[in-house]
Image (cartoon, grey):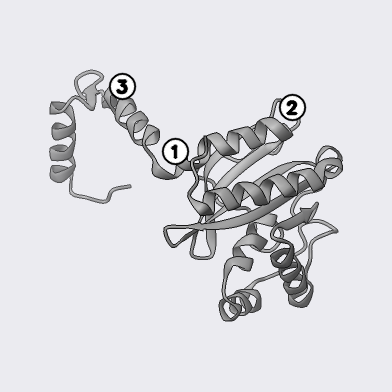
Amino acid sequence: MLKIPASSCHDVLRALQERGYIYELSPRGGYYPTLKIYEVAKTIADFDPVLLRAGTLLRSLRDTLDESVLLAKVIGLNAVYLLTFEPTHPLRFLARVGDSVRSLYATSAGKALLGSLGEKDRNAALAAAKLSALTSNTLTTPGALRADIEAGNQRGWHLNREESQEGVTTLSASFSWTSTVYIVTIAGPAARLEPKLAMASTLLVEACRQLADGKPSS
């Protein structure tokens, strides 16, 4: 809800109508967007600097592994998905653009986010976190989670083995660009992803290295 006066709302609608972004369905029948809004949105997406850098590279990663590949941007103690590439398999890990990372402590993306923080901020986040068990594999003590995050930082990627959802394995790594942290995640059914975990982790780390270096994704 905009929570603005009706007169101001009417002025906004009239301006949008005059510029061709909406049209009136019928007298007092409400308004609907025209395709001009779609054209504007497509132009924005086509020239998004992050998507231009990462799209081709992450799509190639998805094609190689045939598993879900996702890109999220860190915003404080949250991360929002900007790109999602789905595999050909009907059984897959699903996340939509605009969704937030499901858990800060039980997902590989959440661990990568915590791992990107300085020690003081990480300890504060761990102290404030309510580590409820989402599955039988969820790490529910600050000490165990801290050790797992430190191990992930040392090897360059973080792992979630059915900690947030039964039967799902995910791995994530972070990179920084223009003073902002981004997270790349590879996700899929545990039975399918575990046998190719070594290859997936190597490709994941290399992809993040290229994105951090600013190399063209093509």
How far across and down, in percent of the image, does residue 119 sit? 61, 79
User: Residue at left 58%, top 81%?
Assistant: 120
Please tell me which of labels 2 and 3 falls first in the chain: 3
The percent position of residue 116, horizontal first and vertical second, equals 59, 66
What amino acid type is highlighted by mark number 2? His
Vertical comparison of 13 with 134: above or below: above
Q: Which mark is residue 178?
A: none
Dot 1 falls on a residue whose secondary structure is helix
On screen, residue 141 above or below 206? below
Residue at the bottom extreme, as displayed: 120
Q: Residue at x 44, y 38 (%)?
A: 52
The x, y position of residue 29, in whole percent, is 26, 23
Towards the viewer: 18 or 139? 139
Q: Are marks 3 and 1 in contact (CB under 8 Å)?
A: no
Nearest the eye: 43 or 35: 43
**Foreground residue, 78 or 60?**
60
**Tag 1 residue:** 52
- Do tag 2 and tag 3 residues touch (Cβ < 8 Å)? no
Q: Is 99 above or below relative to 24?
A: below
User: Which of labels 3 and 1 is toward the front?
Assistant: 1
Query: Could you say where residue 151 lies in the image, as x and y percent from the top left?
Result: 76, 68
Residue 80 appears anywhere in the view: no
- Mark 3: which amino acid? Leu
- SS at circle 3: helix
In the shown orientation, is residue 67 left or right of residue 15? right
Q: Is residue 182 left or right of residue 159?
A: left
Q: Quadrant of residue 137?
A: bottom right
Give the distance between the C-alpha atoms of the residues marked 2 and 3, in whole angstroms.
Answer: 33 Å
Residue 19 appearing in the image = yes
What whole-number distance in Å separates the C-alpha atoms at marks 3 and 1? Answer: 24 Å
Residue 159 horizontal side relative to residue 214, left or right:
right
Identify the residue under disc 3. Answer: 35
